[in-house]
Image (cartoon, rainbow, N blue to C red):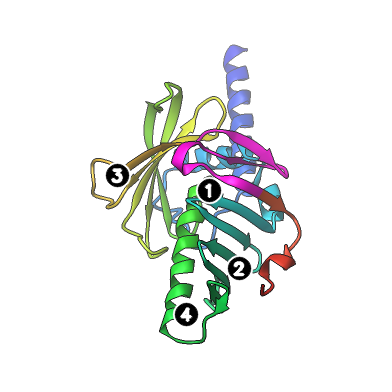
Amino acid sequence: MQIRGMIVSLVFALAAGSVAAADNPPAPGFDAAGSDARAVEIADRTMDAMGGRARWDAVQCLAWEIFGRRHTWNKWTGDYRLEDGDQLVIMNINDGQGRVWKGGAELEDGPEKAGALDRARSVWINDAYWVFMPYKLKDTGVTLKYLGERAAEDGRAADVLGLTFAGVGDTPENRYEVLVDRETGLVSQWSYFEKATDTEPQITSAWNNWHDFGGIKLAERDGRRAVTGIRVSADACPNAFKAP
């Protein structure tokens, strides 16, 4: 009877895993063949702990501030607003087209404007990843590996995911080790490696101060890497993308 109960429990666990995977399909180009099944299972659990894929997909507009830069992003359309010092950029991340104001004056077409648009897109890639990385564990170009169990710097037990990339972003040669808290399923820490072959990270940083924002969870963090002014909306935030 005990053995039968164990088998039934295993069947239900496998079924639950299948449902979780179906509820959190990978992005086109995710390296499913090269990724570990255990790592994918943990990524799906993390998505569920943050509110679930359906709620993340229902979010249209996100705003946040990090590193002194203010961002507003419509993730459905690619519309994006960056306020960075005396410079304002309103553009579309997908096609790279947009407008730039510096010191209140709009820049004409030319090298300075083109450079500002290119930089804004790179800033978006970097700053959005610092806030939304846990939602992007099964993104295009990502390979996930399970690296075992390790204690985070706060002493809590965590599963370690290894993330490498192929042909995406500005720096596909980067590597990350992402620690997922075994109790909560939320990311608790990450380490950034400039090169996939590096043995020592350049940055190790906690992911803490998780809070609910409109049905999804985001980590506000602390210190220099704190994320502030978070807004989550199911509408398009159209006023954010109008010219000043």
Q: Which mark is residue 113?
A: 4
Q: Which residue is mark 1?
A: 131
Determine the CA span between mark 4 and mark 2: 19 Å
In the rendering, at what x and y percent does residue 37 appear? 46, 42
Residue under the image location 48 percent in, 67 percent down: 120
Give the position of the N terminus as an image quadrant. top right
Q: CA distance from mark 3 to mark 1?
A: 18 Å
What number is the disc on residue 78?
A: 2
Q: Earlier in the sequence, mark 2 or mark 3?
A: 2
Residue 36 lies, in percent from the top left, at 42, 43
Does residue 182 belong to the magenta stretch?
no
Q: Is residue 137 visible?
A: no
* Residue annotated with mark 3: 202
Crowd rating for badge 2 (residues with CA inside 10 Å; few <14, some 14–19, many 20+): some
Query: Residue 31 at x, y = what percent?
Result: 43, 56
Magenta-tinted stretch:
207-230
Q: Amino acid under label 1?
A: Val
On the image, the x and y values in percent for residue 66 come to 51, 50
Nearer to us of marks 4 and 2 is 4
